[in-house]
Image (cartoon, rainbow, N blue to C red):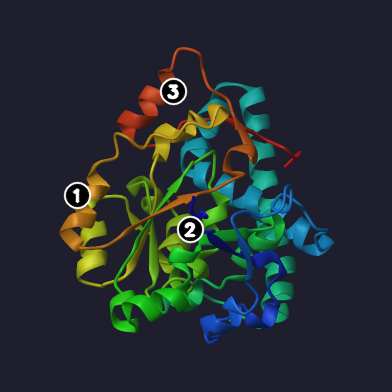
Amino acid sequence: MTDKKSKKYYKLNLADLPDDLFDKSVPVSKWLDLATCVEDKFPPNSLNKVPPIDRQVEIERTVGIALYMLGNVLPFALPMLMFAALLSDIGYLCLKCFLVYFGTLFCINKYYFLPIFVKKYKRKKYLSDTDYADNQYLYTERNNQKYMNSQFVWPESLHRPLMEEKMGKNQLHQPMIFCAIPHGAAPLGITAYPIWSKLFNNRLCHWTCAPVVLKLPIISTYMRQVGYIPAKARHILDTLTKKEDNIGIILDGIAGMFQSHNEIAHVQARKGIVKIALRAGAPIVPVYGFGHTSLWKVVVDPFGILENLSVKMDVALTPFVSSTVW
C-alpha cells in the first residue's frame, strides 16, 4: 500500500497586504513572499475569521458601495420616479428623497473620502484613459479587499514560481480565462482586480459585464477604465488573441443571480466560453467565490417572471436586501 501524495495549497490575504505593496510597480514576488502554504487542507475555520476593520475604511465602503449600486439603477429609476412625481404627491416625495439620498452619498464620497484615501494610498486623483493596469489599484478596490477580508487560495499547480519552473516564463504568460461562480447580487470578491492581472501571469485581466452596463452614464466610464469589456464572444476572443490579455467572467451571470439563495451555479449550459478557449488556445481557470451569495439576499418571485425577463433582456431585474441600513 502506497502513501497518497499530499497536495499543497497557498493563501494570500489581501486585507493584510501592506498598503505600500498595493502598487503596480511592486513585483509579484513581494506578494508571494506573504503567501502561506499548507499541505492537504487549511485548519478548520481558519479561512472564515474576520479581523477588525479600520472604522474609516468601513464607513467609506458603506457609502461607496451604496453609491455604486445606486449608480447602476439611476438611469432606470429616475425616469420612473419623475413620472410618478407628476402623478401624485407621494411620487414627488419619493423622487425628492431619492435625489437627496444619492446627492448626499455622492458629496460625502467625492469631497470627503476621495481626498483622504488618495493621499493615504498615494494614488493619482483621476483615472488614466490608457493605463488600465494602474487604474486597477483604485483606493475603492483596496478598501473592498479590507472590507471583504479578501483571501485567495490556489493549488500548487497554479503557484507561479512552480509554473515558471515547469512551463518556462514565456509559455506561462499566455492569456488565461478566469471563470468565476457564483454571481450573487454583486460579486465583490472579483474586485481585487490586480490579483487577476499579476498573481498568475503578467497579462492585464479584463472582466466582462452585461453590455448594457457599459452604456450607463458615469458607471460605464469607471468600468471601462479598469478594463471591463462586454460579455460577448467577439470582444472576449479579440482580447485573448489580439491584445493577448486575460479574461475574467462570472460564468453563471444574470441567471445565477436568481439562484444565489440555493448556492446553485448555472455552468453546464455555458459551453460558449469553452469554444472560445479552444479557439484562442487559452486555459480556463475555475474560480469559486465563497461569500458572494451572503452579501445580499436576492428577492426571488415564486413565478420566475423577473428571472425570465432579466435573461431575455440581458438586464438584471433583481430586488435585493442588504445586511445594512444602507
Check contact, mark 3 vs mark 1: CB within 8 A.
no
Which residue is nearer to you in this view: 216 or 259? 259
Image height of 176 relative to 203, above or below: above
Quick one: SS at disc 3?
A: helix
Count of marks placed on residues: 3
Q: Which sits earlier in the primary sequence, circle 2 or circle 1?
A: 2
Q: Compute the Cα span from label 3 to label 1.
A: 29 Å
In this view, which residue lies farthest toward the front? 1
Residue 69 seen by the camera: yes
Q: Mark 3 highlights which residue?
A: 306
Amino acid type assigned to the residue bearing label 1 in the image? Lys
Q: From the top left corner, tell me how far across and down residue 251 is, in percent.
A: 38, 44
Q: From the top left corner, tell me how far across and down residue 11 is, in percent.
A: 61, 64
Amino acid type assigned to the residue bearing label 2 in the image? Ile
Q: Mark 2 highlights which residue?
A: 218
Image height of 4 relative to 133, above or below: above
Q: Mark 1 highlights which residue?
A: 275
Q: Which sits earlier in the primary sequence, circle 3 or circle 2?
A: 2
Amino acid type assigned to the residue bearing label 3 in the image? Leu
Q: Which sits earlier in the primary sequence, circle 3 or circle 1?
A: 1
